[in-house]
Image (cartoon, coloured by chain):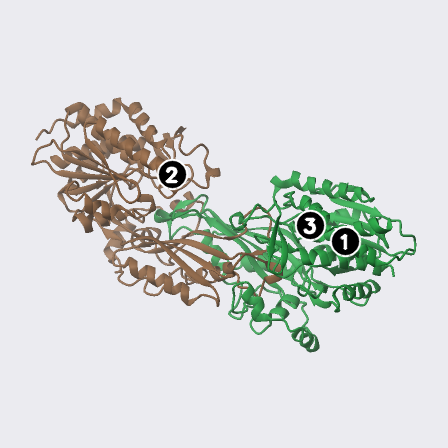
Chain colours: A brown, B green
Amino acid sequence: MNNPSIDAVLAHIDANLDASRARWFDLLRIPSISAQPARKSDCIRAAAHIRDLLIGMGFEARLSETKGLPGVIATHHHAGGNAPRVLFYGHYDVQPVDPIALWDADPFEPQLVDQADGPRIVARGAVDDKGQVMMVFEAIRAHLAVNQSLPVNLTVLIEGEEECGSPSLDAMLEAERAALAADFVLVADTNMWNRDTPAITTSLRGLAAIELKITGPNRDLHSGLFGGPALNPIRALTRILGDLFDDNGSIRIPGFHDGITDIPADVLQSWRETGFDEAGWLAAIGLHHASGERGRTVLEQNWSRPTAELNGIFGGYQGAGSKTVIPAEAGAKLTFRLVPGQDPAKVIDGFKRFVTERLLPDARAHFEVFGASPGLMVPVDAPYVRAARTALEAEFGKPPVLAGCGASIPVVEAFERQLGLKTLLVGFGLDDDRIHSPNEKFEMHCFHRGMRAEARMLAAFAA
Amino acid sequence: MNNPSIDAVLAHIDANLDASRARWFDLLRIPSISAQPARKSDCIRAAAHIRDLLIGMGFEARLSETKGLPGVIATHHHAGGNAPRVLFYGHYDVQPVDPIALWDADPFEPQLVDQADGPRIVARGAVDDKGQVMMVFEAIRAHLAVNQSLPVNLTVLIEGEEECGSPSLDAMLEAERAALAADFVLVADTNMWNRDTPAITTSLRGLAAIELKITGPNRDLHSGLFGGPALNPIRALTRILGDLFDDNGSIRIPGFHDGITDIPADVLQSWRETGFDEAGWLAAIGLHHASGERGRTVLEQNWSRPTAELNGIFGGYQGAGSKTVIPAEAGAKLTFRLVPGQDPAKVIDGFKRFVTERLLPDARAHFEVFGASPGLMVPVDAPYVRAARTALEAEFGKPPVLAGCGASIPVVEAFERQLGLKTLLVGFGLDDDRIHSPNEKFEMHCFHRGMRAEARMLAAFAA
């Protein structure tokens, strides 16, 4: 097994930044929004683009068809039988872009914007996850350019449905079990602790997504002629949703908190010692008070507590001015973030019961579930985690923070359940990257340091 | 003063139905949606169309410009000094057409649809108010065709902003006070008791319209990274709106019911004696239970009680699937129907207080008021009301029901306040005409009998 100096690889990365960014932009220009059926052909185009990119780098690569959008599977297995087998996972799909009016430019025409702290790239998918995927690809490219080899036997899996709940992933993992054999999974879809401090994410929340629709009258009605005696579905809906939290911000769904264990006092203490700036975190999003569960810190809520979030609400007239209508239906979209111990199916059932118990007469509830995955913990003592800690410290001059994460990467649970693989979560986004929001960005500083850190980690896994 | 036989006028109406319908269709084809700024030129086109129609009938007619959409004012004052002066009011603007997908055909391409009970016209504005306006115009046209004169000195005022709260009406009435001088106002914008029984509307509810918007974070946020500790405006909104009614369906806004007097027991008894079919009324709209205030009948609620209706609600992601977003804002559109005694300004203030008292920390409430008018009663003992009762009984073979009305025609209050004029409300719509809804219709039977009844009333006013 070769173990050439990492320095030449890092120098190659530093010398080829413009070319790396140009390849990254090519991918960002493809509007691969997986949640929108009209974008299906763009998603397939993004998958083919990545396949061809990997073939061009010397991988064997192909699309893996599913009932939905295809995945990309590629292998570069030339490091010898003693080298570790790494499965790198990312996703090529992105979130919808609405409200489109709040973007400063076309979300799919990446902008290089200069700021006081350096240039940044603004585009949908800039960081989540196209930017982080390209960061890893460019680290691989540098290894191959300098050494004509990789330190590990690498398999790449790039999914196309992560942003809509990965409905086809289980079937794909099952079908591709042999192709995906590895020692562990590497994921680049998380954040740094801050601009100068890397992080390894050691816990993830699960996600259950559901749409609730309330129907009432058999058609839209004139609110002057029918208002009052005719059931108003918006009234029925807000009556239910307004009851979702008690005055302390605690979620009132029956059985919702079953299975959750309290975080030990010493862990809470270690979180306090991170020096997390709660006021600054709130100020950055225009707020002064922590919402959610009273008596729990922002960090504690984000890293260890479940949530119920209202992601959308709709019904009746939404145009300019007023319209005297009682709509025939109204609805809301919710997601629940789940922590280890909670049963996603039980949470969904509990919510349905919560709703149906509060329905006004004649109101009917209709549910559509978009996916449900549990929260989970990631081991911190495995050899590849120690290797990553060493590599990150070498790049940044300080050890990574071992952090919790409020977000969900359901695939991590799927890898564990289906393939028996643990996942190493190292990413280079920042908390203010506006992922899922207008003007999503990824800073060149983070992309550049991320490429270098990924190159170091690839070498360290084999050391 | 001439008082020729009405029979020739009625025969002329009967003989010219097709031509009347063709002229009605021409007006329906103009998409004059006053609430939508993009339709402004269509609204102005509708005003000019009506002006030219009246000029063609022998009226002096002109547009009356306002800060918003113009009104049409026309006069036909050749009945002599002893004839009554009648001001006919209608409106040429119509409601928005969304949800457009629920229409069976283009809302502005009127359809003649045959049904078991006769043909009907389906279009936006079919009845509200273009159909009723054309019904009166065609009655006038028949008088002029047969007698080359009208029994009354007639002034016509056709407004263009009724469906968005008549923001320019007060200024127009003030500016046109002299031109609009009359003995009373005739309005055709209400319903029959049923297909075979006419009605005179003797009470109207007022209307206060408001939009509430709640803002929170300074941008849309990722609900996994920020959910819980970051204020969710949809949560703040539903928490407030979910508290708007108590468990008995009573509105909880402070001071909301101030000034309302109970309906006397004998009046309630007379309402019960109308034989109103509550179960049938509910079944027609797909419901089985009366909503609203517990312990009050549908008729009592509609004719004598105020309401708070949620006409629209919006916020966050509304597309297909799910999106893990916390929106920066969420809002709702409400209208309050008011009864005599309630002060519209006090209702608006009470709602604002109700909202602000329930705001979560960091949530900010923004209000936009679209208009506020009180409820009012219409006298039933004036000479022109007695004339209308006689004419309606002659046409239908039974006396009209003296009915309350749950809807609002704010102009009636404006005529009283600004011009000192009382209003006679006789209309020929049916409760199932779907006004403000997809597939709005007006039955040819009602249009035809309405023309005849209007022709009889014009003659009766002068008798």
Residue position marked by numbered label 3 in the rendering: B130
Q: Quadrant of residue A7?
A: top left
Residue furthest front as drawn: B15
Residue hosting label 1: B13
Residue found at x 28% / y 32%: A48
Select label 3 or label 1 by which is in front.
1
Looking at numbered disc 3 in the image, what kind of residue is underneath it? Lys
Q: Residue at x 47, y 49 (%)?
A: B315
Answer with left or right where residue B230 lies relative to residue A85.
Answer: right
Spatial CA distance of label 2 from label 1 is 57 Å
Gap in Å between the C-alphas at discs 3 and 2?
Answer: 42 Å
Q: Quadrant of residue B297?
A: bottom right
Residue under circle 2?
Answer: A39
Q: Where residue A10 appears, x then y in whole percent?
A: 21, 26
Q: Amino acid at mark 1?
A: Ile
**Residue B68 visible within the image:** no
